[in-house]
Image (cartoon, coloured by chain):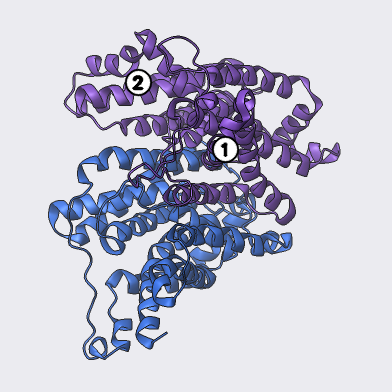
Amino acid sequence: MPELPFRLERRAAPSRVMRVAAPLLAAAAMVVTGAVVFSALGQRPGAALYLFFIEPVTSMYGLGELCVKATPLLLCALGLALGFRANVWNIGAEGQLTLGAIVGGGVALFWGEALGLFAIPAVLIGGVLGGMAWAAIPAWLRTRFHTSEILVSLMLVYIAQLLLVYLLHGAWRDPEGFNYPQSKIFPDNTALPALAEGVRANIAAVIALILAAVSWIFASRTFAGYRMLVAGLAPSAAAYAGFSDKRNIWLALLLGGGAAGLAGVCEVAGPIGRLQLSISPGYGFAAIIVAFVGRLHPLGIVLASLLMSLLYLGGEAVQLSLQLPSAVTGLFQGTLLFYLLAADLFVGFRLKWVRRPAPAAAARRAAEVVSP
Amino acid sequence: MTSAHLIAIIVSTVIAATPLIYAALGELVVERSGVLNLGVEGMMLVGALTAFAVGHATGNLFIGYLAAMLASLALSLLFGFLTLTLQTNQVATGLALTLFGIGLSAFVGRTFAGLPITGLEPLSIPVISGLPIVGALFRFDWLVYLSIALYFAVDYFLRRTRAGLRLRAIGESPASAHALGQHVIRTRYLAVMFGGATSGIAGAYLSTALTPMWVEGMSAGRGWIALALVVFATWKPLRVLLGAYLFGGVTVLQLHAQGLGIDVPSEILSMLPYVATIVVLVLICRDPRTILLNQPASLGKSFHPDV
């Protein structure tokens, strides 16, 4: 291990300033890294950064797109944050999102027209239930068989995606779709209404914001939220107080799965309008980063989801204008989380520079001690 | 089922199991030192891309493997610096490493998609490899043989050497080991680096031997399956080896389904490895004592002598 010129010293109390400053520091470090990456790719960093971070949101349409992509991120991250606070590591939001899209999409495809005015609520509820059902599997296995929810929820991501592939290649494929693996377009009465003329953002964004407020109330003003907080911060205290571990796990996973399912169904009943093979560019995984960058706090998560959405828009922008791979988005996402974790160190610790006295000075001091 | 069928299944099982063996044996050593690195999937992807890219550029797969080991080792050092020196949460940092590895490999790998590469050739053992039918069981590439050697080496290291005993002691109780003068952080760094290097080879095997090409996200959850294998194996090397072959068999089932007369849609068969992972986790974790008795006691917990 390298000998560092500083030592970590635990702060008497976690620094509140650093808790807020750490995500900002991390975002700043990510932008600097972005500049380095862009110049390494032979671009003028200033122009590329402008194109990536500013240009996408200079138009009304762009702001709408920012909402479109922030909505599923916000929904997934709100649910995940509830779990993370309680030490429940649901990392399978992507699978719960997929199942939400499948179930909600199935309602829209097969009963959409018959449901008339009730179609939209029915489709959304279908999505929520789909996500919840998928998250119930790791919850049940964890509470009944002590199985790691991390691994189970993640395995279910792959299973959900294969299930979608199976349906779209078989029973749910559009018969007039030239054998293309996608479903029929959903009936008109299931389409989520847009927020304004000419933008793709729809009422899902409003629902997500309302849920952010609800989740803030849940986490800070209800006993169930308090129990989950204690379980996360001090598991043994929670056990001593008689708070049920199982109830927390169920609650965290069901709420997280429901929110992710809602995100999925809002994608297919909103911007996409049908079931297709790719319904999410990894929103469920990016939401893990959103939850952390947002400090597991609803307000922070709203802001973090906008930042993460901007990373998607920026990736598309540099692909279109500079022919750079849009995968730069994923690179930025991972980098952001790394920087955040490193910056987080300063919430609980401060750096103390270790001054190593020169040998002569040390000897003199030793002599002083011996002969007062 | 003919014997040729059976042999074809065995051969493809062994090949499918090989990357799992590398990744899971590495993670086993990491976890025995008390560190949980959830970044295996990300390190595998970076290893897969690096081996492919360097192998493609130099025409020499061996250099590609070295580069893959170094690249994944560098990522594991990043993980080590964050979790061991800066004491960040191991679960969150491991997730970050996976997300970063997925993003990095997709970003850099864009130019390598669809390029050809000459895959790893099987070694031919004189006489035996030439035998009819059973000869196929002796025509593996050298990384297959090395994976079995690695099992013996890891098993010997953990059970029969002083350093292995120290590593296990550190995984059980870092505070006691530290009090006895052991270098907890240094040992954990070395374990994490070993895990990084083996993940690199595991990924490299995917892109140069199993399917000689680069596809974004080609590890398809194998890094996570390797993590599950370590739990399934109750942190014992032999069971990692056997578990990997079991999973290899499940993975290749869909390739042989038609020959075996199984008429199930391929998507459903492709779910099998993931379903099997969940099933074995349930079987192992059902009795909490199994985990309690076998899991390194300090797994996932930060330790630092200074604070």
The residue that appears at 58% across and 40% down in the rendered structure is A103
- Indicate the chain coloured blue by its letter: B
Residue B139 sits in quarter = bottom left
Q: Chain of mark 2?
A: A
- Quick check: can you spot residue B45? yes
**First in residue order: circle 1 vs circle 2:** 2
* Dot 2 crowding, Cα within 10 Å, few <14, some 14–19, many 20+: some
User: Which residue is situated farthest in the front direction here?
Assistant: A114
Q: Is residue B99 left or right of residue A350?
A: left
Look at the numbered disc 2 and give the secondary structure of its residue.
helix
Q: Which residue in the structure is indicated by mark 1?
A: A100
**Quadrant of the drawing holding the N terminus of chain B:** bottom left
**Quadrant of the drawing holding the C terminus of chain B:** top right
Residue A211 sits in quarter = top right
Say which amino acid is labelled 2: Val
Q: Which residue in the structure is indicated by mark 2?
A: A31
The residue that appears at 63% across and 54% down in the rendered structure is B173
